[in-house]
Amino acid sequence: MKITKLNLSSFRNLKDVEFFPDEGINVIYGENGQGKTNIIEAIWLFTGFKSFRTRKNSEMIPYNEEKYEISMDYFSENREQNIKLSSDISKQETYKNGVKMVSPRSIIGEFFSVVFSPSHLNLIKGGPDEKRKFLDIAISQLKPSYARMLSDYVRSVKQRNALLKNFNDTSYEYDMLDCWDERISTLGGKITFERLKYVDELTESAIEIYDGISSGKEILSVKYNQVGREAKNEEKEITDALCDALKKSRENDIKNKFTSKGPHRDDFEVILNSKNIKNFGSQGQQRSAALSLKLAEASLIKKINDEQPVALLDDVMSELDTSRQDYILNKLKDWQVFISCCEPTQVLRMQSGKSFKVENGKIIF
């Protein structure tokens, strides 16, 4: 999968930008606040997922502008294709190859990319919410049905929580709890099973990538934690264990008025040389580990869909030593990569590819 052309109109501070990226490494450099990350963000939107920077679509529309329009030509499935997105404050429109789509999420699975930004350091240093979000978005790119299943699960937990908040200790309400427990256990078992499979495959790829980034000096691993219940590996066993955990926690859940067990509470930890990297890793090691997880995500997309996703690396060079930067600039073979950075000296170490300077929302060739 390769982007051949990108057009951005009135997207944040990018007024009218058109450029033709290299099929390999593309370094976008310039001072802070000039629009480098905006280009990375725009490309990510073509996956059908929301921005990795904001939940408000209106924040991507410049002041005194009515809407933004972004368009991308890319090569996929052995042919040239196009996706166009436009949005005003009230609505978004999405077109693929000139055909209007039902919604932006309709293009999930059409264009694959992975994004690394400084916020993804939360995969290492942050709480369980960010880690679960990473897994759920990654799996949804591979299996759009997973996104629908996750939505059903979240809705079921909300319904159970609503029941708990107004619980009056009647037999009818206990019967309703039984129904929601069964529903949550069934969906939760499927979600946990998919996450476990994904983490196993992710770990295999992440170990290889981190080995390259660290020049073989460090060993990485990832462990998924089924919080608050007995850890199981098979779907039926996971479902049964979750159902049992919900029953045992029922009285506490009624008291506290929320559902305390399930994949919405799970976590994973990243281990480096047998120690939790969150507590014992340096800044460079933590950034390298987060990057390895994101690049491993891309490798799994390639393995399953036979399409190499585009890698979007925002401010990835900070806190990495020269050898780790060299791996990113020159060792990611057969990938199309977009890297944003501030230092133009890093561009000089590129062995191939293109560089683009961004200044005041424009690309300076």
Image (cartoon, grey):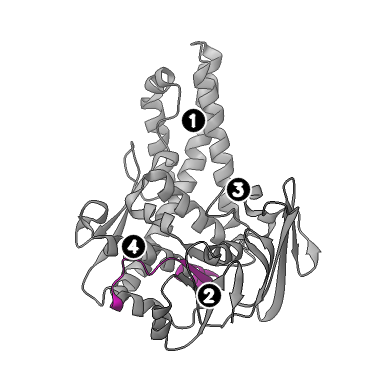
Relative vertical location of residue 192 with respect to residue 116 in this rendering, above or below: above
Residue underneath mark 2: 308
Identify which residue, 236 or 113, lies in the foreground.
Answer: 113
Using residue 313 as the reference point, say whether residue 281 is left or right of it.
Answer: left
Choose top left, top right, bottom left or bottom right for residue 97.
Answer: bottom right
Residue type, mark 2 in image: Gln
Residue underneath mark 1: 181
Q: Earlier in the sequence, mark 1 or mark 3?
A: 3
Q: Which mark is residue 148?
A: 3
Specify whether residue 1 is in view: no
In terms of secondary structure, where does tag 3 sit?
helix
Q: CA distance from mark 1 to mark 3?
A: 19 Å
Residue 176 rendering spot, x and y as whole percentages: 55, 22
Q: Residue at x 43, y 19 (%)?
A: 254
Q: CA distance from mark 4 to mark 1?
A: 39 Å
Q: Earlier in the sequence, mark 4 or mark 1?
A: 1
Residue 345 rendering spot, x and y as whole percentages: 39, 80
Residue type, mark 4 in image: Arg
| Quadrant for the N terminus in the image | bottom right
Image: magenta residue range: 299-323
Q: Residue at x 41, y 58 (%)?
A: 118
Using residue 84 as the reference point, say whether residue 231 is left or right of it.
Answer: left
Q: Are marks 4 and 2 in contact (CB under 8 Å)?
A: no
Residue underneath mark 4: 287
